[in-house]
């Protein structure tokens, strides 16, 4: 039984360029094939479920409701380009 269920709704997507280690990329692609969905969807689900378990981050988000990813921030090793993030219009 897969841990990640096929998607039930569509959410707006943005483009984010990042690098994966080759074995991780292979596992990602194969898992997506296993559940019959895209690697993008699997990555989003992994990030959502992992972040939801981080109590410190959830508390921080509650304390900072106006924080957005678009706002440049130099803390915790983040670069001014948001680690290569870019939005797609």
Image (tube, rainbow, N blue to C red):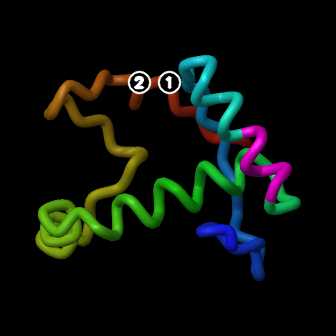
Query: Looking at the picture, does residue 12 appear above or below residue 71?
Result: below
Q: In the picture, residue 19 is in which quadrant?
A: top right
Query: Looking at the picture, does residue 31 appear above or below residue 52?
Result: above
83 and 1: which is toward the camera: 1
Indicate the secondary structure of the residue bearing disc 2. Answer: loop
Q: Residue at x 54, y 19 (%)?
A: 21
Q: In the picture, residue 20 is in which quadrant?
A: top right
Question: Residue 7 vs residue 15: left or right?
Answer: right
Range covered by the magenta-colored residues: 29-34
Residue 50 image offset from top left, x and y in percent = 38, 59
Q: Residue at x 47, y 63 (%)?
A: 48
Q: Which mark is residue 32?
A: none
- Residues marked 2 and 1 touching at CB (< 8 Å): yes
From this viewpoint, which residue is outermost toward the bottom?
8
Instruction: Name the mark nearer the viewer: 2 or 1.
Output: 1
Circle 2 crowding by C-alpha within 10 Å: few under 14, some 14–19, many from 20: few
82 and 72: which is toward the camera: 82
Based on the picture, tell me whether residue 30 belongs to the magenta stretch.
yes
Q: In the picture, residue 58 is in which quadrant?
A: bottom left
Chief secondary structure of the magenta span? helix
30 and 89: which is toward the camera: 30
Residue 16 image offset from top left, x and y in percent = 60, 35
Q: Which mark is residue 81?
A: 2
| Quarter of the figure that contains the C terminus | top right
Residue 56 image offset from top left, x and y in percent = 12, 63
Query: Looking at the picture, does residue 71 appear above or below residue 6?
Result: above
From the image, tell me which residue sits under label 1.
Answer: 84
Indicate the secondary structure of the residue bearing disc 1. Answer: helix
């Amino acid at each position: 039984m897969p841990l990640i269920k096929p998607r039930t709704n569509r959410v707006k997507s943005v483009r984010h360029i990042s690098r994966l280690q080759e074995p991780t990329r292979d596992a990602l692609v194969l898992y997506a094939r296993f559940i019959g969905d895209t690697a993008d969807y699997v990555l989003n689900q992994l990030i959502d479920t992992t972040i939801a378990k981080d109590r410190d981050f959830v508390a921080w988000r509650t304390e900072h409701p106006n924080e957005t990813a678009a706002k440049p921030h130099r803390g915790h090793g983040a670069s001014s380009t948001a680690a290569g993030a870019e939005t797609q219009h």
